[in-house]
Amino acid sequence: MRSMIELSGISKSYGTGATRVPAIGNVSFSVAAGEFVSIVGPSGCGKSTILNMIAGFLPPTSGTLSVDGIPVAAGSVPQGLGYIFQKDTVLPWLTVGDNIGLGLRYRHEQKLRIERKVADLLAMAGLSGYEKLYPHQLSGGMRQRVALLMTLACDPAVLLLDEPFGALDTHTKIVLHKELLDIWRRLKQTIVMVTHDLDEAVTLSDRVIVLSAPPSRLILDHRVSIPHPRDVFSVREQEAFAGNVRAVWHVLGDEFRRNQAFDRIVTGSAA
C-alpha cells in the first residue's frame, strides 16, 4: 500500500534560549492510504500538535512531513485534507443543510449538485429530514455528526480527528463510532485520530501509536489484531479486544507511572 502521510524526524519546540520548551522530541511514522491510525499518550505530549503540523497549521522545528507525496508547507493546508475538531464547528445561523453544503458553495458548485450531495450525506449519517433545522435544535451528537458531514462534503482523501467524541456521553460516542466506521469503509479515507480513550482507539483503528511524555518520542506502534468490519457494540466483548487494550496499556501505563514518579521527584526537589 502506498504511503499517504509521512513524518520523518519531526520535532517541535516553543520559545528560544533559556525559555525554550521541547514539546516533541523526535517522531517518525507513516500512514498508508486508507489506513486508520490513532495517536495516544500522556497529556501535553504533542498529539494535537502533530495533527496541526500535518495540516500545515504549525511548522515543525526540525524534520519533514508530506501528504500524498507532497511536502507540507506551514500556512498551507494540503490538498484533499479535512480536519474535525473536538468542539463542533457548525455555524449557528445556518441550517443543517446549509452548514453541510457550505464548502461546496465556496467551491462554486452548482446548486443542484450541492442539494444532491447534502441529501446523500444526510442519508448516510441517518439525518434525513433534519436539513431545515438549526444547530441549537440538535443534540451534541447530532451537531458533531453535522460537523463531520461538513468536512466529508468536500471529499477529503485524508481526515484528521482531534478528540472528536471526547465531550460526548458513552452511548452517543459508540453510535458515532459505528457511523464513522461505516463512512470510512464506504469512502476509504486515510484517518489519523488523536484520543485519550484507549478503548476508542482499539475499537476504531488499524494501528495505535503511543507517544511518550514530552519531549515526546514514539514508544509503541501497535497493529490492532481485530479484522474489519467491526461491530462496535460487540467488539469489546471479544478476548482479542481485551488483548489489544492490554498490549497498548502495558506500554502506556508504564509511561504514566514514569511520568508520575518524575513529577514527585521534581515537586520534592522544589519543596
Image (tube, grey):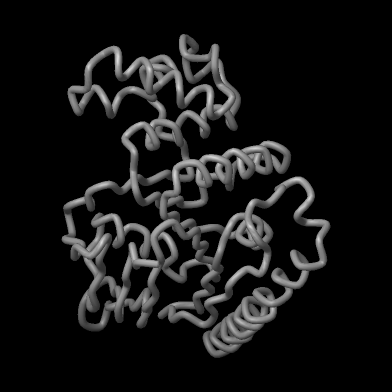
Q: Which quadrant holds the C terminus?
A: bottom right
Q: Residue furthest front?
A: 1
Residue 224 at x, y = what percent?
Answer: 62, 68
Measuring 36% from the left and 17% from the top, which residue is drawn there? 98
Q: Which quadrant holds the N terminus?
A: bottom left
Question: In terms of depth relative to the viewer, which is nearer, 11 or 72?
Answer: 72
Measuring 51% from the left and 51% from the top, which residue is drawn there? 163
Q: Is residue 169 toward the left or the right of residue 20 in the image? A: right
Residue 269 at x, y = what percent?
Answer: 55, 90
Question: In terms of depth relative to the viewer, which is nearer, 120 or 7?
Answer: 120
Q: Residue furthest top?
A: 132
Quarter of image, res 49: bottom left
Question: In terms of depth relative to the viewer, which is nearer, 34 or 118?
Answer: 34
Measuring 37% from the left and 76% from the top, which residue is drawn there? 24
In the displayed structure, 112 sits above or below 15; it is above
Residue 72 at x, y = what percent?
Answer: 20, 62
In the displayed structure, 40 sits above or below 85; it is below
Measuring 55% from the left and 58% from the top, which residue is drawn there? 195
Question: In terms of depth relative to the viewer, which is nearer, 203 or 120?
Answer: 120
In the displayed structure, 162 sits above or below 259; it is above
Q: Is residue 98 toward the left or the right of residue 222 in the image? A: left
